[in-house]
Amino acid sequence: MKPPLIATELRSHAPFTAFGTITGIVIMAAFIQFQISREISSTLFWTMHPLHVMASALVTTAMYRLHSKGEILPTIIIGYLGSVGIATLSDSIIPFAGEWLLNMPHRGVHLGFIEKWWLVNPLAFAGIALGYLRPKTKFSHAIHVFLSTWASLFHILMALGTSIDFVTAILVAVFLFLAVWIPCCTSDIVFPLLWIKNENGNDEHPISVSDGGTP
């Protein structure tokens, strides 16, 4: 995939991510206003993160399946790494970096594929199966972005105290945007197509999810 195409895709997905970030800030404000417990944030994280992994696995696998020879083992490996690996970066590692830099009181990194392996990994393989068997399935990229945004948000809310100042809120918004924007585009587009390029020696990939779904 050529760098200009990557830049185009990042630009085209920025509005989705910005809107998702706004919803995250609204949810965060409501949680703080109504003193919603960290336990509820934890429950919501462990709901959104596995769903995000499944959605990512579906889109990543479908993208690779459409533009490769369709060999099963490489498809499974790419689908798994592109979903679990990148979703963990998006939902857990980048938010934890923000929690650490902002010195949040309950910060910690939560690795779903290890902590709740019995939930996250089966959903990843379910997404891979769906993407492999029905690679033309339409799946809204906007939904993927929202799931990723909310998973990242609830990871941060688990670490957050009972109050937050304006500057911290702005910095949280920045981390939410970064945690979703580049990883989601990487998972859906760049990662699977890089492997296709290596396999076919071809730099032309006329595929995009900018229209909101994977063909």
Image (cartoon, rainbow, N blue to C red):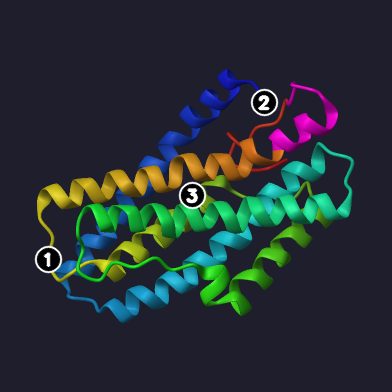
Percent x, y for residue 15? 41, 36
Instruction: Describe the element under mark 3 as helix, strand or loop.
Output: helix
For the stretch drawn in magenta, the main secondary structure is: helix
Indicate which disc, 1 or 2, sits on the residue closer to the N terminus.
2
183 vs 115: above or below: above
Labelled disc at residue 145: 3
Residue matched to label 1: 163
Labelled disc at residue 53: none
3 or 2: mark nearer the eye: 2
Left or right: 150 as drawn, with respect to 215 = left
Choose between 164 and 31: the one closer to the eye: 164
214 vs 134: above or below: above
Q: Quadrant of the C terminus?
A: top right
Q: Residue at x 48, y 66 (%)?
A: 48
Percent x, y for residue 66? 81, 40
Q: Residues within 10 Å of mark 2 (few under 14, many from 20)?
A: some
Q: Using the numbered discs, state the Cα–Cα distance from disc 1 to disc 2 in whole angstroms.
A: 44 Å
Q: Residue at x 13, y 60 (%)?
A: 164
| Quarter of the rendering containing residue 122 | bottom right
Asked if the stretch drawn in magenta spans residue 199, the answer is yes
Residue found at the very far top of the displayed protein: 4
Labelled disc at residue 1: 2
Indicate which disc, 1 or 3, sits on the residue closer to the N terminus.
3
Residue 91 in view of the camera: yes
Is there CB contact under 8 Å for labels 1 and 3? no
Percent x, y for residue 132? 81, 54
| Quarter of the rendering containing residue 76 | bottom right
Asked if the stretch drawn in magenta spans residue 197, the answer is yes
Is there CB contact under 8 Å for labels 3 and 2? no
Q: Which residues are magenta?
A: 193-205
